[in-house]
Each structure stands twice: as structure tokens, then as C-alpha cells.
Amino acid sequence: MSTGATDSGLEQRVVELENRLAFQEHALSELSDALAAARSEEARNALLMHRALEELRQLRLAVSSGGPGLGDATSEPPPPHY
């Protein structure tokens, strides 16, 4: 094999490796972006869950302590059929 053919084959292999590396770098960047978005969404969902649980706790407290108008049947007018 001549030196020109060897150089051409080597150059083709280097170009193929560079293309693979560029593809992998692009895929890694996309995965990194997707992971960052997932972490952000997870944090948002955790905050929403925390707020919902806190509201539920407050509602339970209001109902159990007999808060104004909550769970007190005597404060309601009689049904229309009376």
C-alpha cells in the first residue's frame, strides 16, 4: 500500500472519529438540558405538594376546632322542607 492511500485511510478514520465525538457531545448536551429541566420540574412539584399539604393541615385544624361556619350544623338554616 502506498503512503497516499494510508494517509487517506487515516484521514477518513480521523474524520469519522471527529463526527462521532461531535454527535456524542451534542447528545450529552441535550441530556444535560433534559436533566436540568427535570430537576427544576421536580423542585416545582415538591413546592406545590408542600403548599397543598399545608392547606390541608389548615383546613383540618379549622374543621376540628369548630371554626366559623365549618362543620357546625346549628349555624345553618333548616332545609326547605321543614
Image (cartoon, grey):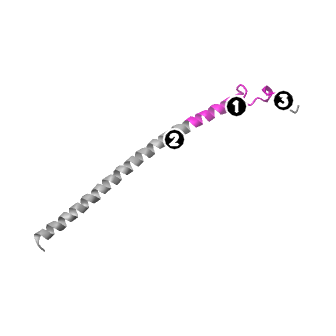
**Three-letter code for the amino acid on which mark 1 is drawn:** Val
Looking at the rendered structure, the secondary structure element under dot 1 is helix
Q: Which residue is mark 1?
A: 63
Q: Is residue 56 magenta?
A: yes
Q: Which residue is mark 2?
A: 45
Q: Which residue is mark 3?
A: 78
**Three-letter code for the amino acid on which mark 3 is drawn:** Pro
Q: CA distance from mark 1 to mark 2?
A: 27 Å
Looking at the rendered structure, the secondary structure element under dot 2 is helix
The residue most toward the bottom is 1
Which of discs 1 and 3 lies nearer the camera? The answer is: 3
Closer-to-camera residue (79/8): 8
- Quadrant housing residue 20: bottom left
Task: Residue 37 in the image: state x and y as whole percent.
Answer: 43, 44
Task: Residue 36 in the image: state x and y as whole percent.
Answer: 41, 45
In the displayed structure image, the side of residue 49 where residue 76 appears, left or right: right
**Three-letter code for the amino acid on which mark 2 is drawn:** Asn
Residues in magenta?
A: 51-79
Establish if 67 lies above or below 28.
Answer: above
Q: Is residue 1 magenta?
A: no
Establish if 66 lies above or below 52.
Answer: above
Within 10 Å of disc 2 (Cα), the crowding (few <14, some 14-19, many 20+) is few
- 2 and 3 marks in contact (CB < 8 Å): no
Which of discs 1 and 2 lies nearer the camera? The answer is: 2
Looking at the rendered structure, the secondary structure element under dot 3 is loop
In the displayed structure image, the side of residue 37 where residue 26 appears, left or right: left
Residue drawn at 28 percent across, 55 percent down: 22
The C terminus sits in image quarter: top right
The N terminus sits in image quarter: bottom left
Q: CA distance from mark 2 to mark 3?
A: 43 Å
